[in-house]
Image (tube, grey):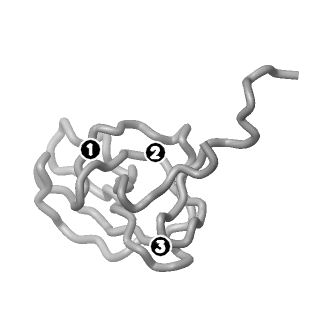
Amino acid sequence: MGGGGDIVGPRIYSCCNCRCHIADHDDVISKAFQGRNGRAYLFANVVNVNVGPREDRQLMTGLHTVADISCFQCQEVLGWKYEKAYEEAQKYKEGKFILEKAKVMKEDW
């Protein structure tokens, strides 16, 4: 049996609107991102989201093809998915997800 304190389950992020499970804390890559409305986190993976149409968007780090992601349960827009980065230094973001800190909540931790 492993040790590990009082954590009962995985630490998760959920939709601020309906509390649907959106992402696991283990999938956080960086907390140093900017969203539309302030701080945002870069995630390797998210669940229970709808991915909207792709569009080219000029972000602080250059031109990217992104698609908004929304909660599949309540349709709240939570952030976006990086589909394509045009600058070599930004390629690591492709296939990753931005979740706006104001749009998600930590569940039970």
Identity, as a three-letter code, of the amino acid under mark 3? Asn
Q: Pointer 2: what residue? A: 44
Q: Pointer 3: what residue? A: 50
Q: Are marks 3 and 2 in contact (CB under 8 Å)?
A: no
User: In which quadrant will I find the N terminus?
Assistant: top right
Q: Between disc 2 and disc 1, whose residue precedes?
A: 1
**Residue at image location 11% in from the left, 59% down from the top:** 58
Identity, as a three-letter code, of the amino acid under mark 1? Phe
Q: CA distance from mark 3 to mark 1?
A: 21 Å
Indicate left or right for 55 with 28 as reference: left
Query: Which of 80 and 35 lies nearest the eye of the viewer?
Result: 35
Q: Between disc 3 and disc 1, whose residue precedes?
A: 1
Q: Residue 31 falls in which quadrant of the image?
A: top left
Q: Pointer 1: what residue? A: 33
Nearer the camera: disc 2 or disc 1: 1
Label 2, residues with CA under 10 Å away: few <14, some 14-19, many ≥20: some
28 is higher (above) or lower (below) than 46: above
Q: CA distance from mark 3 to mark 2?
A: 16 Å
Q: CA distance from mark 2 to mark 1?
A: 14 Å
Q: Are marks 2 and 1 in contact (CB under 8 Å)?
A: no
70 is higher (above) or lower (below) than 97: below
Label 1, residues with CA under 10 Å away: few <14, some 14-19, many ≥20: some
